[in-house]
Amino acid sequence: MATTQNRYSPSWVDRLTDWIEGLPIPVWAFYAILYAVAALGLNGASWFNEARPWGEFSLLQLYNAIWLPLALIVIHNTDSVAHKALDRFAPLVKEKSKQLDNLRYEMTTMPRRTVLWISVIAIIFLTAGAIQDPTLIVYEFGEGPIHPAAWFLSALFGISSYSMAPVMIYHAIRQLNRVTQAFALIENPSIFHQQPLYAFSGLAMRTALFLVGQVYITYLGDRLYSDVVTGDDLINGALTIVMIPLALVMVLAPLWGIHQRLSLAKQDALEENSFQIERAQRKLYAAIDQDKYTNIGGLDSALDSINKVRDQLASVPTWPWAAGTFRNFLSAVFLPMLLWALQLALGRFLGS
């Protein structure tokens, strides 16, 4: 783990989000401007390509402009959520503030060299793919060859958008791995004091929902692409196949370790409770055998109280999230997909 004196340099993405935070405008306003610039640039490619008259905006290009700001928004937002989660978690590890401070840096800051290499490799592969198949980045063709300006604008915004996807996934995996490390700082987790643990479940589910949201945005794009032959269907299909399982893993994996520890703590508490029940029962049986009924009422009351404690222990959750949270998450993930699949199946059945 990096120490305060020997921390790695932040990535270009982190420097960019820090710069955005320092602007004299709201963060949302910057991303709105970035989207407008991307939309204008991609529509400019259609205009130069004579696919549309100058000044006429393409719904397809307005859709494609989403991806560049979206990746940055996901990284920026989950970093903000991580800071808040760490603040809520901090009371559990007051004596380990230095370790938590280092984790805060690692959870919200990616290493410069790693992100640079990911970006460069992604750009190289995307550029090579676009050279072989221009439809990978040039979505609307006019008559004749592709205009050089259309090539430039499509490459600038298309490749930069797609190259952010692996950075975003790396950021999510790295961040949630640090959640596991944060939980490891707790020596003896208490099943009766779980509220601070819920903070990281919010971060994990937020990250997963962002990934799932991109799958549904891709489905929206498929409707827009239905009349356009493009070369990025393979990328969209691969993202769809990968993102849903990855989203589930991102929710469960970082919380699995603390779930196991809470389960053990719950088993220990139930075992202790069983021992107390056994002791109370032995005393009750002994009183009955000895015809000493004066204490039976007290023993019966004590046994009833111990059994109530057992019921309470049995109901204690061992996953660090509030009741119903994971069920709501699954609904958000699978219900829209199920409706989309039913709509697709009905469309094919009625069309046949």
Image: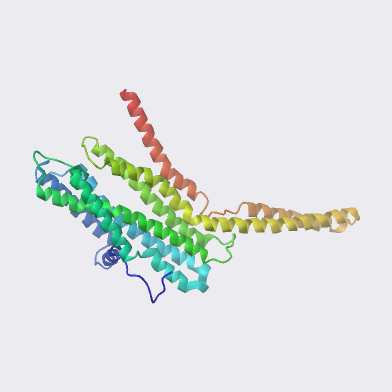
Q: Is residue 101 visible?
A: yes
Residue 43 percent across, percent down from the top left: 15, 47
Q: Residue at x 57, y 66 (%)?
A: 187
- Compared across the picture, whether 209 is left or right of 112 comes to right
- From this view, report whether residue 296 is shown above or below residue 46: below
Which picture quadrant has residue 261?
bottom right
Q: Is residue 320 visible?
A: no
Which picture quadrant has residue 13?
bottom left
Residue 198 percent across, percent down from the top left: 49, 58
Residue 81 percent across, percent down from the top left: 39, 60
The total of numbered circles placed on residues is: 0
Of all residues shown, which one is farthest toward the top? Answer: 352
- From this view, report whether residue 210 is shown above or below residue 12: above
Of 35 and 258, which appears nearest the observer? 258
Q: Residue at x 22, y 52 (%)?
A: 159
Of all residues shown, which one is farthest toward the bottom? Answer: 5
- From this view, report whether residue 155 is shown above or below residue 194: above
Name the quadrant of the C terminus. top left
Which picture quadrant has residue 240?
top left
- Compared across the picture, whether 5 is left or right of 324 comes to left
Of 261 and 325, which appears nearest the observer? 261
- Compared across the picture, whether 47 is left or right of 291 comes to left
Q: Residue at x 42, y 70 (%)?
A: 102
- Compared across the picture, whether 82 is left or right of 61 comes to right
